[in-house]
Amino acid sequence: MTDHHWYFAYGSNVLLQQMHERTGDVYHAVRCELRGYRLAFNKDSVRWGVAANIVVDDDHSVWGVAYQMDAASLLTMDGFEPGYRRTAVTVHTHHTNARTSLTAVAYISDNIREDLAPPVEYLEKILRGARQHGLPAHYVEHVRLSAGL
């Protein structure tokens, strides 16, 4: 399994259906937490106007899903994430009773714009995916409020 990588999804890619449409099968999907960052809806997006992004912030954390995929699938993901750059991050998994950390790739953007809220359709994908993976209820509510809804 040396060809496998972890990808940390925090935006609309937390929705498993979207990941299957983009990359096909995923080997594993594990809910996890990225500490030292906060979720922001500030990435300039041609499709949505504004999209999810993560910003360094020692006082916050971002919940999401770590997907294990092969290198070809990760390259495919690059095509779906224009304007983002791959960044290595350490996430803390919360799978059953086991808690571990792993290194994953997250997409982070410097192409920011602060003047728009994300469209409801985009936000609904994030919220459905968050509930699908059992992300904490308080975090799901935080995402909703962060988007201005």
Image (cartoon, rainbow, N blue to C red):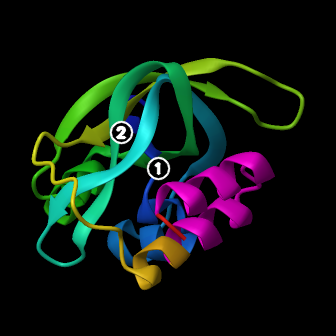
Whether residue 136 can be seen here:
no
Judge depth for marks 1 and 2 and give the one in front: 2
Question: Residue 54 bears which disc, if any?
Answer: 2
- As for residue 108 lying within the magenta part, the answer is no
Rendered position, 40 above or below 3: below
Residue 131 % position (x, y): 72, 64
**Residues shaded magenta:** 125-147
Overall secondary structure of the magenta section: helix
Between the residue at mark 1 and the residue at mark 2, the CA separation in whole angstroms equals: 8 Å
Instruction: Give the camera-side residue of 69 and 33.
Output: 33
Q: Is residue 142 magenta?
A: yes
Q: Mark 1 is on which residue type?
A: Tyr
Where disc 1 sits, the SS reads loop
- Using a 10 Å C-alpha cutoff, classify the residue at mark 1 as few (fewer than 14 neighbours), some (14 to 19) or many (20 or more): many
Badges 1 and 2: C-beta atoms under 8 Å apart? yes
Residue 10: which disc?
Answer: 1
> How many numbered marks does the figure carry?
2
Q: Position of residue 59 (x, y in %)?
A: 53, 18
Question: What's the residue at 21%, 36% (across, down)?
Answer: 86
Left or right of residue 34: residue 3: left
